[in-house]
Image (cartoon, grey):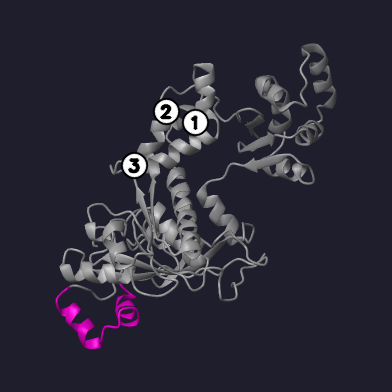
Amino acid sequence: MEHSSMNPPGPLDGLRVVESTSFVAGPLAGMTLAQMGAEVIRLDPVGGPADAGRWPLDRRGRSLFWAGLNKGVRSVALDFRTPEGQELASALVTAPGAGGGLFVDNTIGRDFFSYEALSRRRPDLVHVHIQGHPDGRPAMDYAVNPLYGVPMLTRHVDIERPVNHVLPAWDIATGLLAVSGLLAGLQRRHADGSGSRIDLALADVAAAHVAHLGWLAEAADRGRDRPRLGNHMFGAFGVDFPCADDRRVIAVAITRQQWRDLVRLTDNVAVFDALAASTGADFDVEGERFEHRALIEAVLAPWFARRTAAEVLEAARGTRVMVGEFRSPKEVVDAYRRGEESPVLTEVEHAGGAMLTATLPLRWGGAYVEPRPAPTLGADTEWALGELLGLTDRQIGGLTERGVITRPFNPTNGNR
C-alpha cells in the first residue's frame, strides 16, 4: 500500500497539547497525538532537551533518535531558569481555547509545571505526568526491566547471565498509555467540565503488564520460576531453525490448524501420527506441543536444514504456519530500498537530507498518515508567543535580547 496523506481534519484536529518531555515515553506520546491531528507544542530548554544529542547519530552528529521520536510537533525554546521563561511556559500550557489545556510532561523539580500550580490558572487542565517510580524516583526502561524478572526469562538455556533486551518495551507502553490517559481525561472534561491530574509511572507499567500476562501468578502458584527456554515459545510450539544457507528462521504454530499445516509442510504427517500413538501425546493440543517441544524440534530440524531460508519462506506461503527470517537492521533497510518492506516505513526530511523512519501504524480509511519531520529546536517559539499569547514583535525581540528565548538551532552530540 502506498503512503497517502490523511485528509484534514485529522481525528484529533482542534486539540492543542503542550508537552515538556525527553527520552522515549513522553516524546512518543506527543508524536502519536500529533500524527492523529493534534497540534502538539514541545517546550524545550534553550540549550536543547537532555535527549537532543542521544544516539544513534547521523554522520554529522545529529540525533536520529530525537528526530525519529518528535515528528510532526512544534518546538518552543525557553529559558526555564528565569521567572520570565517559567511564566511563558505556564501561560502556553494554560492558554485559552476549548481544545487547549492539555499537558504531558516528565519533568522533575519544576514546580511551575505541577498540576497544582497550573490548575490554578486553568481548572479544567488535563495533565499527564510521567514518572519513573510512583514515589517520584527517576527510572528508565533498562533499569526497570530487571526488577520484574523479564531478563531472567529471555536468557538462553546455556547462558547464566540475564539478558536485558534492547527494546524499551515499558517506555513504549508508557507513552501509549499516556495518550490513552490524556484522551480519557479529555472525555471526562467534556462530560462534567472538570480537570484531571493523571500520574503514570514507568515502573508501574512494567509491573502491571508482567502481571497481566500471568507471569507473576504462575510463579506464585507454582512456587518457582519458569525454566529458561531460549528461543522456544512458552506454552505453544515455536522455535528457530538453522537453514542450509546458515541463516535462521523461526516457525510458530499456535492453533491446531497452524500445527497441522506445519506437519504437512515438512512432510511429517506419518511421523507425528506414530509419535502420538507411541507417546500418548495429542499434538493438536497447544500445551502438549510445548511439553514435547524438544522432540518436535528434533523431528522438524532436518527439513529446515535441507533448505535455504528463502526456500522455507516460499514453501510456507499459502499455509497458516507463521515463519519469519532473522534479519539485521541493515537487512531491513536493504529490503526497504528494494521496495519489499512494510509500507509503514517511509522517509522524511532531516538536516537537509532524507531520514528513514516510520509513520503512524493506524490507517484511516485504509490510508497511512503522511509523516512530517521533527522541528528545528525553537522553530516555533515566535509563532507560539505571538499566536497563542498575543505578544508583539517588540516584546518577542526583548525576550530574545534577554536570552529568555533563542533562535532556532540544530543540536549535535556534545554541542547542545
Q: CA distance from mark 2 to mark 3?
A: 26 Å
Query: How many numbered marks does the figure carry?
Result: 3
Amino acid residing under circle 2: Pro
For residue 239, side relative to residue 141 (left or right): right
Which numbered circle lies on residue 162? 2
> Nearer the viewer's eye, disc 3 or disc 1?
3
For residue 102, side relative to residue 316 (left or right): left
Q: Which residue is mark 1?
A: 154
Q: Residue at x 22, y 66 (%)?
A: 86
Residue lying furthest top: 278
Q: Is residue 376 above or below residue 272?
A: below
Badge 1 vs badge 2, beta-carbon distance below 8 Å: yes
Q: Which residue is mark 3?
A: 134
Q: Quarter of the image for the C terminus: give it.
A: bottom left
Amino acid residing under circle 1: Thr
How far across and how far down the image is residue 304, in percent?
70, 33
